[in-house]
Amino acid sequence: MKNFALIGAAGYIAPRHLKAIKDTGNNLVAAYDPFDSVGIMDSFFPQASFFTQQELFDRHCTKLQRSENKIDFVSVCTPNYLHDAHVRYGLRLGANVICEKPLVLKARNIDALEQLEKETGCCAYNILQLRLHDSIVALKEKIDNGPADKIYDVDLTYITSRGNWYYTSWKGDERKSGGVATNIGVHFYDMLQWIFGPVQKNIVHVKSHDRVAGFLELKKARVRYFLSINADHLPANAVQGEKRTYRTIMIDGTEFEFSAGFTELHTRSYENILAGKGFRISEARNCIQIVNDINDAVPVGLVGDYHPLARIPLCGHPFGW
């Protein structure tokens, strides 16, 4: 049994990490979040110490590191812009770290984290759960075993509706979340480059507060993508089915189905990490670089090979910003 500490216990993604710690037969000894709406902990680790002040959490964890209840892993479930700092904290504490996506907001920070791993002798792992999805693993095997010179035509559409609360939260602040491409797209970009190879060209057609559309030329694929958090962009069949999320990937005109099988991917990620097979810092470099390049790009407009939904007219920010 390993001892875990968790940073960001009140966040959206924390329950998946709590469940993964529990399901893998390990123990949570300490948790921290500036917000105290963490009743979810009663379902998993009611005996864990909880702190709303970082200083007291740090004091407690430091004391544990000098006891028989030493912390083996720190799980990071905080807002995107804090991941780098909290990964650093866990490594300096003398623990291995499991960090939710994105590992960092800037690719240049990866080198510094790898250096800190060497200095501390501890390891940091990134949750790249789509690489563990059975259908996606099977697709990668199919592409790897297919014709070496074949170039696939891929359309990625991902619409996950968000209300006006989104723009008031840290997620609506691009400096903190990295914008739409980072916040909802980084794991898809990771999946695509993992399957089809590294990026050779990265073009952005449309980019605003609620969407991003562009074109990625990968080693084995031409990818048109459209990502959105606007419910008005949902197709009719999703609206009629009262669905708030729509995801589809078309490969050479055929839909790739992977809508099921998501519920246990965090637990499987933890199992791999505990078995020494987790995704290390370097694995995140390509997808972080992709979103960095998208965020830095000046949109070229509706020219060249663009996703059909890129034609949807841009709308103003809901708060007039």
Image: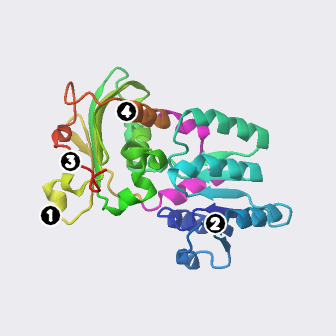
| Residue at point 42%, 49% (across, down) | 183
Residue 7 point in image, percent of width and height? 62, 61
Inter-mark Cα distance, 2 to 1: 41 Å
Mark 4 or 2, which is nearer the eye?
2
Q: Quadrant of the N terminus?
A: bottom right
Name the quadrant containing residue 147.
top left
Inter-mark Cα distance, 4 to 3: 38 Å
Dot 2: within a 10 Å radius of its alpha carbon, few (fewer than 14), some, or many (20 or more) residues? Answer: many
Disc 4 and disc 1 in contact, CB within 8 angstroms: no
| Residue at point 49%, 61% (across, down) | 13
User: Which residue lies most toward the top here?
Assistant: 149
Closer to the N terminus: mark 4 or mark 2?
Answer: 2
Q: Which residues are magenta?
A: 263-286
Residue at label 3?
A: 315
Work out whether 308 lies above or below 238.
above
Dot 3: within a 10 Å radius of its alpha carbon, few (fewer than 14), some, or many (20 or more) residues? Answer: few
For label 3, the SS is: loop
Residue at label 1?
A: 240
| Residue at point 54%, 67% (across, down) | 19
Q: Is residue 248 left or right of residue 91?
A: left
Disc 1 and disc 3 in contact, CB within 8 angstroms: no
Closer to the N terminus: mark 4 or mark 1?
Answer: 4
**Does residue 275 show up magenta in the picture?**
yes
Closer to the N terminus: mark 2 or mark 1?
Answer: 2
Residue at label 4?
A: 143
For label 2, the SS is: strand
| Residue at point 57%, 62% (across, down) | 8
Three-letter amino acid code at disc 2?
Tyr
Q: Which mark is residue 32?
A: 2
